[in-house]
Each structure stands twice: as structure tokens, then as C-alpha cells.
Amino acid sequence: MTESLFQPFVLNATLTLDNRILMAPLTRCMADDNLVPTQAMADYYARRADTGLIISEAAIIRPDGQGYPNTPGLFSAEQIAGWQNVTSAVHAKGGKIFAQLWHTGRVAHPHFFGGEYVLAPSAKKVDGSVPRMRELTYTVPKPATAEDIEQLVADYALAAENAIKAGFDGVEIHGANGYLIDQFLHYSSNDREDEFGSTPENMTRFPLAVVDAVASQIGTDRTALRVSPGAYFNIEGDKRDRQVFDHFLAELEQRELAFLHIGIFDDSMEFDYLGGTASNYVRSRYSKTLVGVGSYTAETGSEAIHNDKFDLLAIGRPLIANPDYVEKVKKGVALVEYSDTMLAELV
């Protein structure tokens, strides 16, 4: 049932994966107080190097992108050196690893960087408080100016360059899950009336600029993107979002990315304005390499690949519980069940 998962997969002329199982990005909040990856993180990723590709936990591109405690960065020399330790450990085990590039936008908090405000498309506050620091409630963001947006594009490109310096095999731009790039793509978080809002062409302008800047910096073959066409986390859905993603995916289809990755916690979730699940919607509009994720088992994920629902399977929480996930699935050994108590340690 799962044999197809263990066949090599050619992403492009530069990158071939040993198998079709990816480690999904999993925020663990285990960097040090300077947001530098630790030795424990290097050991954690190295133990999972037999996946076809590891996508790292999200790394913030600059200080004002931080929305959770102790999330690693990719903007200082110390952080780059810390990640070099991680990538070297993964490569020593024969693995490949991409860095996920992150700015949380309105889900950031000034507490982390000593600022006066956070940036977002519009002055539309998200409800709630910072995970793991519930005393910090979210603030009303400052709408990013054209100059702010230009700088953000440059900072994404610089973070991609830093990732390559740190030894990563490529990057995945985090354009999903209600964070900055995703906030531009949904009407509930973007009510701008300038060249970055109101129409699908305008609302995709910044996300596409980031994709193009990163690809120009490190190559399209080393550039991937995660997207959430269905709003479900920190964002409200709007039927008009469909038109935005119709346009966005048509633009992405014209680019030669390493892969496109669905951002969803559970891919059985359906969205009326997408006509079903997020992965089915994206697959119907994007013909190139697609990564599925969202509560799949090896068996159901393999079946989805067999049915051409997507090409690669990203596994999240089961890889926290089972560092040897790939070996266990190959041998048909029972998996350890994930528990939230496992988040306290990097095992």
C-alpha cells in the first residue's frame, strides 16, 4: 500500500529526493533567546534525515516578524551559524533540508522586538493572544506602506540568501496559515484600495513579488511556496477569495517552483467557495509538483498520490512522535501515537 512513497522523486535538474515523504514544518519554539538554533535542534532534525526532504520550522526573516517565543531567525550572523550546525547534521545523515521563511504580519507582537507596532496589509486586528504567552493580546497593526512592502520583499530575498549560506538546499516561502503573505490574499484581512488591494491582481502583487525576488536570488529550483486558499486559521473566509487564488495559481503555474505546498491542518476540511478541499482545488489549477498535508497517514497519503491528488506527502505530528517514521512505515511497525506532551522536548 505504501511502496510508492519510497521511490526517488525528481523535483528538478538540481534536486532529487530519496523518497516522497517530507517532514512538514513544525513550530517548536526551541531556539535560544537570540533566536539562534541550538544543538538540540540539530540533533532533532538529524534524526529525521531519512525523509525525502525536511522543511524546517518557520524562521523569521527579520525581528518584527516574530509572533511566538523562541522561534529561530535567519537574519543575524549567529542565527546563520546556528542553522549551519543544523544543516550539516542533516547532510551528514544523507538528508536534504529546506528553510521555511516567515513573517507573521498582524500575528506578530511588539513585545518580541521592542517595537511600537506590527505590520500587516490593513489595520485589522486578529482576535486572541500569543500562544504560550497568553498575557500578550494582539494589537491593531499598521498598514504597510509601499516603501514597507518594498523593504519586506528585499528582506525575504536576503533571508533566502542567508538560508543558502547556512547550508539549506532551498527555501519554502511561508505564504499560508494566516501569516503576512496570506493576509494579503484574503479579503477579511486586506481591505486596501491601493495597488496591493481590492482586486485579485493587486492582492497577489506582494506575494508574487516575494516569490520572484527569492527565485531571482537563489534560483527557481530552490524556491518553494506554501499556500492556504481556504481561510481557516487567524483569517475569516470570503467567497471573493476564490477569485484571488484563481489568479494567484494561474501566475504560479507560469513559474518553475521546486514545489507548491498546501497549508492545512486537516485536508478533509471543505470550503464552499473552493468547491471542496483545498488540495483538490489547487490540484485542479496547478499541474506542477504539489505537496499534500493534513492528517494523512502513510496509507491514505500513498493512496492520494496514486490517485494524482498530489505528488509528495508531508507528515507533521507523527514525525514528532516517531523520529524513525520512514523506517517504521517501511517495515510496517506500529507508530507511537502523538501527544501534546511531546512538545515539551525535542526528541
Image: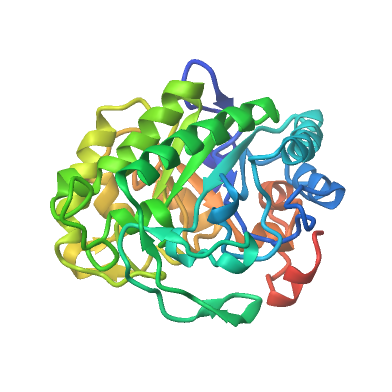
- Compared with residue 264, is residue 172 higher up or lower down, i.e. above or below? above
> Quarter holding the C terminus?
bottom right
Q: Position of residue 227 (x, y in %)?
A: 37, 50
Residue lying at the far right of the rendered structure: 39
Above or below: residue 11 compared with residue 59: above
Q: Position of residue 208 (x, y in %)?
A: 31, 37
As drawn, is 345 to the left or to the right of 146?
A: right
Which residue is drawn at the image coordinates 56% and 61% (left, top)?
A: 115
Whether residue 18 can be seen here:
no
**Residue drawn at (82%, 49%) of the image:** 38
Looking at the rendering, which quadrant does residue 53 occupy?
top right
86 or 149: nearer the eye? 149
Q: Nearer the viewer, residue 305 or 215?
A: 215
Percent coordinates x, y for residue 109 in the rendering: 55, 67
Q: Nearer the viewer, residue 314 or 252?
A: 252
As drawn, the residue found furthest toward the bottom would be: 135
* Rendered position, 110 above or below 90: below
Q: Is residue 262 left or right of residue 243?
A: right
Report the front residue among 286 and 248.
Answer: 248
Residue 273 lies in quadrant: bottom left
Please tell me in which quadrant of the rendered image residue 80 appears: top right
For the image, the number of numbered tags is 0
Asked if residue 288 shows in the view, the reply is yes
Residue sticking out furthest to the front: 116
Question: Image point 62% across, 32% down: which residue?
Answer: 163
